[in-house]
Image (spheres, helix red, strand yellow):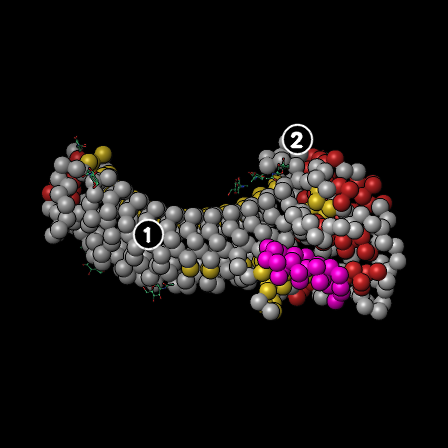
Amino acid sequence: MVRRHFIWIAVFLVCSLPAKGTPECTSQCQNRSKVVECVGRNLTRVPSSNKCQRVFSLILDNNWIDLKTGDFASFCGLDAVLSLNRNRIKIISPYAFRNLSKLEKLYLNENKLTNLSRYAFEGLTSLKRLSLSENKLAVIERGIFENLIGAEIFLLNDNVIQNIEVGSFTALRNLKQLELRSNRIEILLNHTFSGLSGLQELDLSNNIVRFMEFNAFRDLTSLNRLNLSRNRIVSVSAVYDLRLTVLDLSFNKVTNLNKDLNRRLTSQHQFAINVSNNSLICDCDIEPLYDWYRNQSSPEGGIAQCAAPPFLHGTPLTEISMQDVCSTNMDATSQTLWTTAAANSNDAMARPGLDEKTESSWTLPVMCVVLGLLGLLQVLLHQDYIVFPVCRTIPRATITPTRELGLWITFMDVNCDQLPPFSPALCPVHVHTSAYMERIA
Ligand SMILES: *[C@@H]1O[C@H](CO)[C@@H](O)[C@H](O)[C@H]1NC(C)=O
Ligand SMILES: *[C@@H]1O[C@H](CO)[C@@H](O)[C@H](O)[C@H]1NC(C)=O
Ligand SMILES: *[C@@H]1O[C@H](CO)[C@@H](O)[C@H](O)[C@H]1NC(C)=O
Ligand SMILES: *[C@@H]1O[C@H](CO)[C@@H](O)[C@H](O)[C@H]1NC(C)=O
Ligand SMILES: *[C@@H]1O[C@H](CO)[C@@H](O)[C@H](O)[C@H]1NC(C)=O
Ligand SMILES: *[C@@H]1O[C@H](CO)[C@@H](O)[C@H](O)[C@H]1NC(C)=O
Ligand SMILES: *[C@@H]1O[C@H](CO)[C@@H](O)[C@H](O)[C@H]1NC(C)=O
Ligand SMILES: *[C@@H]1O[C@H](CO)[C@@H](O)[C@H](O)[C@H]1NC(C)=O
Ligand SMILES: *[C@@H]1O[C@H](CO)[C@@H](O)[C@H](O)[C@H]1NC(C)=O
């Protein structure tokens, strides 16, 4: 009974004492048990009163509110939910929520936030869930989340985030789930996620990730679900040493897996991978993946298909014959060309001549030059990206993007170690490498 009175008093105070310039909400707010709701009432300000309120949740969705410092000073009892979805919040001023030290969930979806100030979330020491989806955030800056040490779930989907500053998440030891779906993230730098030692789920799907530095996921020691679906990933060398149970790589440009992932496919019981709709090169090294798909009755997302060699283009992985693939006596030239074809599946220019078998090794240098010129031509003609073989020794560890002549050139591993060496003059290497060039948008 005492509780009920409190609620009544709370509602009365919230609704009957509008601040200066605040639209009346006396008859508009509703109390449902412990929740006060003023939804869709065209409020331009947070209703307030002079006394500390005994309200547990405050739902202010669908209004015209823009936040001001001190708006919640009278709601220090708020300990469950503060929901401000679909308002007109452009800026959260420093310390806007400082009196809400008991609040657990804060929803700010569908506002107009472009920028978060360093002290925006100061004082929210009990916050567990923060939702900032469908805003216009472009950068995650270091220090913004510094005080949210209790946070468990962050939702940052559907923004325009391009850049996550290294160290942005360092304080968030308790974070379990981080969603960055549908943003514009292109490159993941080493230690982007440092500090997130408790993170279990990371969703980066539907971005434009095309390059991940070797140590991008380095600090995610508890991660078990990683979603990289719908990006532009070619090399997965950064996905290693993680104890994943689910890895979604569907809809990328992946040509082959790495040793760590292959080992997991063969030795780890609970490991689901999705490499459908990629640019897989179906050579002997594809066997662990082939075995894994053969063991799945009907994998969600469908069965991966081969992109290369040409005669297997479009063939579901489970329908190839490992024996045929492994015994094919491929010479170096055709292997290089397969790589070109695989990573460049919607490109018609590099294709003529693909099916020709070129036996002699002197043709390779010529090919290199021709393909290189073709590639350059493509870039000049504003093609999205090209792949062409380079005849250089590039150690595996030095996969770094370099910016040359206004182009991004990413050297990628194509896993051809088992091939015989080329002719010694121009291509004195055992490991072939392809250059992945992309015009900067
Ligand atoms: C407010 O809460 C009280 C107590 O729970 C209840 O009796 C009353 O009907 C509620 N009012 C509205 C408008 O829901
Ligand atoms: C809010 O404003 C819109 C447009 O001005 C109006 O149609 C609507 O009736 C208003 N709603 C309330 C609850 O006043
Ligand atoms: C809100 O927080 C500020 C700074 O911590 C403090 O000075 C103020 O008294 C608080 N207001 C209420 C109503 O508790
Ligand atoms: C974000 O806001 C801060 C201060 O509020 C300002 O200094 C900074 O330049 C802004 N950043 C962007 C990208 O607008
Ligand atoms: C990854 O994200 C995509 C869409 O963004 C979704 O369709 C897919 O189910 C997700 N994968 C997993 C394993 O949750
Ligand atoms: C990222 O980490 C890898 C492996 O330690 C290192 O080789 C590379 O130079 C690092 N990248 C940068 C930009 O520091
Ligand atoms: C596939 O299943 C067989 C028998 O059920 C098992 O021996 C084998 O290890 C499995 N292979 C993989 C890659 O899971
Ligand atoms: C990829 O496969 C996983 C696990 O089988 C599944 O959960 C996910 O939804 C699939 N992704 C897409 C985009 O279908
Ligand atoms: C994705 O791959 C599946 C087979 O795994 C295929 O049926 C589907 O058409 C592909 N989707 C696209 C958009 O290419």
Q: Is residue 135 left or right of residue 345?
A: left
What secondary structure is found at the residue carrying circle 2?
loop
Closer to the camera, 352 or 431? 352
The verdict on residue 382 being magenta is: yes
Residue for point 22% across, 52% down: 72
Q: Quadrant of ligand 8?
A: top right
Q: Position of residue 258 (x, y in %)?
A: 68, 52
**Of the pair 342 and 319, the residue shown nearer to us:** 342
Which residue is label 2 attached to? 297
Q: Amino acid at mark 1?
A: Lys
Q: Position of residue 316 (x, y in %)?
A: 70, 37
Q: Residue type at mark 2? A: Ser
In the image, is residue 58 part of the stretch drawn in magenta?
Answer: no
| Labelled pair 1, 2 in contact (Cβ < 8 Å) | no
Q: Which mark is residue 424?
A: none
Residue 129 locus on image (x, y percent): 37, 47
Range shown magenta: 369-393
Give coordinates of residue 406: x percent, y percent: 57, 67
Which residue ends up furthest to the right in the rendered image? 360
Q: Which residue is mark 1?
A: 112
Which quarter of the figure is the N terminus placed in?
top left
Vertical order, 106 against 379 (above or below): above
Q: SS at mark 1?
A: loop
Nearer the observer, 88 or 220: 88
Q: Badge 2: few (under 14), some or many (20 or more) residues near its Cα, within 10 Å?
A: few
Left or right: 345, with 403 as reference point: right
Measuring 28% from the left and 50% from the top, which residue is drawn there?
Answer: 88
Task: State which quadrant residue 54 falls in.
Answer: top left
